[in-house]
């Protein structure tokens, strides 16, 4: 079940990696308060391997109150098909992100879909190398926990870990990708989106929020 939402795909100027826009087929908790954090992989091409901006989508469940954000964004190197236990770089951006109400809602209007972006100092990564992007919010004192929206891209999965159990990562949810894209403001020409992302349908079929239940 899920909400398929979208509009005609648009190439973003300076896009160096596009993991697909939000469809909210599922949203995955990534909030220290849950206590899950999630990550998804990406690879940059030679000549397009400098990141200056990070863009993503998400929702607040279950009160839809949009509390003050406290985001931590991390990038991990890959080891044996999973993120390394320690991050390559961390950005504690707090609420210093651009948060935009998309004007779209999920599950018959229960949840508002937000788009986020943040500028970072230019980060040069090795081309043709797999990395993992992790975006985690912290919403203590709120009835809402933040969930990262899934994307139009298929054919892969993301990973998650339980911050209480320790630093180990585990594969999660086959064929579920997270909605984000990366840009470089210094690139003058947009990189075209994949054909499969050029047209997106608009529909509503509910929202699934996946999480693991801890053993009693």
Image (cartoon, rainbow, N blue to C red):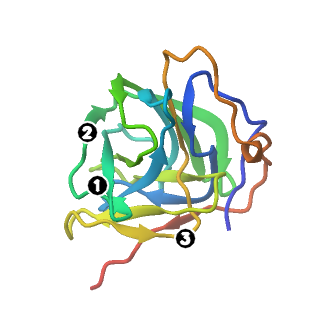
Please tell me the numbered disc located at residue 32: 1
Q: Answer few, some or many: residues within 10 Å of disc 2's Cα (few below 14, many 20 plus, some between 14 and 19).
A: some
Considering only order in the chain, which callout, 1 or 3, is on the residue closer to the N terminus? Answer: 1
The local secondary structure at tag 1 comes to: loop
Point 72% across, 54% down: residue: 4
Q: Position of residue 69 (x, y in %)?
A: 35, 38
The local secondary structure at tag 3 comes to: loop
Point 29% across, 34% down: residue: 94
Q: Position of residue 113 (x, y in %)?
A: 58, 43
Q: Answer few, some or many: residues within 10 Å of disc 1's Cα (few below 14, many 20 plus, some between 14 and 19).
A: many
The residue nearer to you, when weighing 78 against 65, is 78
Point 80% across, 42% down: residue: 199
Considering only order in the chain, which callout, 2 or 3, is on the residue closer to the N terminus? Answer: 2
Q: Position of residue 99 (x, y in %)?
A: 48, 31
Count of marks overlaid on the render: 3
Residue labelled with disc 3 = 174
- Is the residue 54 above or below the residue 137 in the image? above
- The reply to whether dot 3 and dot 2 touch (C-beta < 8 Å) is no
Residue labelled with disc 2 = 90
Considering only order in the chain, which callout, 2 or 1, is on the residue closer to the N terminus? Answer: 1
Which is closer to the viewer, label 3 or label 1?
3
């Amino acid at each position: 079940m899920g909400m398929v939402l979208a509009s005609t795909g648009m190439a973003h100027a300076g896009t160096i990696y596009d993991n697909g826009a939000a469809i909210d087929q599922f949203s995955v908790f990534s909030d220290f308060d849950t206590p899950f954090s999630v990550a998804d992989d990406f690879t940059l091409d030679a000549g397009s391997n400098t990141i200056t901006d990070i863009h993503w989508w998400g929702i607040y469940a279950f009160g839809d109150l949009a509390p003050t954000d406290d985001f931590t964004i991390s990038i991990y190197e890959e080891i044996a098909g999973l993120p390394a236990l320690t991050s390559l770089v961390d950005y504690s951006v707090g609420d210093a992100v651009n948060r935009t109400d998309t004007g779209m809602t999920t599950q018959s209007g229960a949840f508002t879909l937000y788009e986020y972006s943040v500028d970072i100092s230019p980060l040069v990564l090795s081309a043709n190398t797999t990395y993992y992007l992790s975006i985690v919010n912290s919403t203590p004192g709120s009835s809402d926990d933040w969930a990262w929206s899934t994307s139009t891209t298929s054919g892969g999965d993301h990973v998650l870990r339980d911050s209480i159990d320790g630093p180990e990562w585990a594969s999660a949810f086959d064929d579920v990708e997270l909605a984000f894209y990366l840009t470089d403001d210094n690139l003058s020409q947009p990189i075209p989106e994949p054909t499969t992302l050029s047209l997106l349908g608009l529909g509503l079929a509910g929202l699934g929020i996946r999480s693991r239940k801890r053993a009693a």
